[in-house]
Amino acid sequence: DLLVDRRDFPQAVRILEDLGYEHIIRNWALAEEVLAGQVVMTSQSVHVDLHWHLHYSSQDRRPFALDPGAMIERSRRVAVSGLTVPTLDPVDTLLTLAFHAARSDGHRLIWLKDVERAVAVEEPDLDELARRCHEYRCAPPVGLILGRARTVLDAQIPDEIIRAMTPAALRVTDRLATALVHPVQLHERGTITRSVRSSTVASLSPLPTRGARRLRRRLLPPRENETDSPDEKESYLEAVSGLDPRASSSSGAMTAKELS
């Protein structure tokens, strides 16, 4: 996964193309319609998810207020296999790991282990984590994953941090759900974490709308478009690079210059 500033996104796509990578999108009009937050690009040896945002679609981004622009300002550099590369600071790293796990149903052991190791190795400021999560309206889903990492892997996360991030009703609901079905699963069955928003009310109120949306997608799937139109591609890239950063919260952690 590579995360770049939205304004550098078109250039980053072209740099990867010049390096021999190919995109797999064949419907740029749909990508523009949902303002897709990433493009998958592949070479013979490497698979790259090139992101300008941490969420894929504008619909996914709407309930939250993540600010990758602030994340880049706090970013650090670390040594990886002899290279010095930019990455998120310890608090943003933990936030991103836990939030990604929650939005992906939170059922894989490796995601919980990532969280446990991020806490144990980097010792992030958990009070600051709670503050940022509340600011980004993602405290409850992150709190649920922290709680699961503590329960399953004995992650050293104080109970007061989890209580400060997750409403009591959601904690009780998660305890009941995980008592019936173990939180770590070997299949892709969904759990409640994907539906959790910034509060209990916000988590429950959109359920009818989301159900209707899923039904609509089944009955009226997006029109197929296999033209791979260069004009549609450029229109999508221009739409991304021209977004209002305040409205889209769409900056990143690596510049196109660094990518090249």
Image: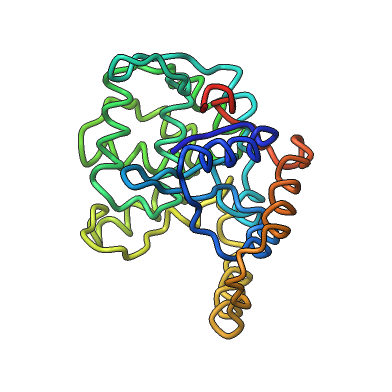
Residue 25: which quarter of the image? bottom right
Q: Left or right: 28 with respect to 3?
A: right
Residue pictured at 40% horizontal, 55% vertical: 173
Residue pictured at 59% horizontal, 30% vertical: 252
Q: Which colour scheme is used?
A: rainbow
For residue 27, above or below residue 56: below
| Percent coordinates x, y for residue 175 in the rendering | 32, 52
Residue 231: which quarter of the image? bottom right
Quadrant occupied by the N terminus: top left
For residue 173, above or below residue 166: below
Residue sticking out furthest to the bottom: 219
Q: Which of 56 and 153 is in front in this view?
A: 56
Q: Left or right: 34 with respect to 79?
A: right
Residue 54: which quarter of the image? top right
Residue pictured at 46% horizontal, 50% vertical: 103
Q: Left or right: 100 with respect to 217?
A: left
For residue 97, above or below residue 232: above
| Percent coordinates x, y for residue 187 in the rendering | 25, 63
Q: Which of 245 and 257 is in front in this view?
A: 257
For residue 201, above or below residue 48: below
Number of numbered discs visible in the structure rendering: 0
| Percent coordinates x, y for residue 128 in the rendering | 51, 20
Q: Left or right: 70 with respect to 168?
A: right
| Percent coordinates x, y for residue 108 in the rendering | 27, 50
Q: Nearer the viewer, residue 132 or 238?
A: 238
Residue pictured at 53% horizontal, 81% vertical: 218
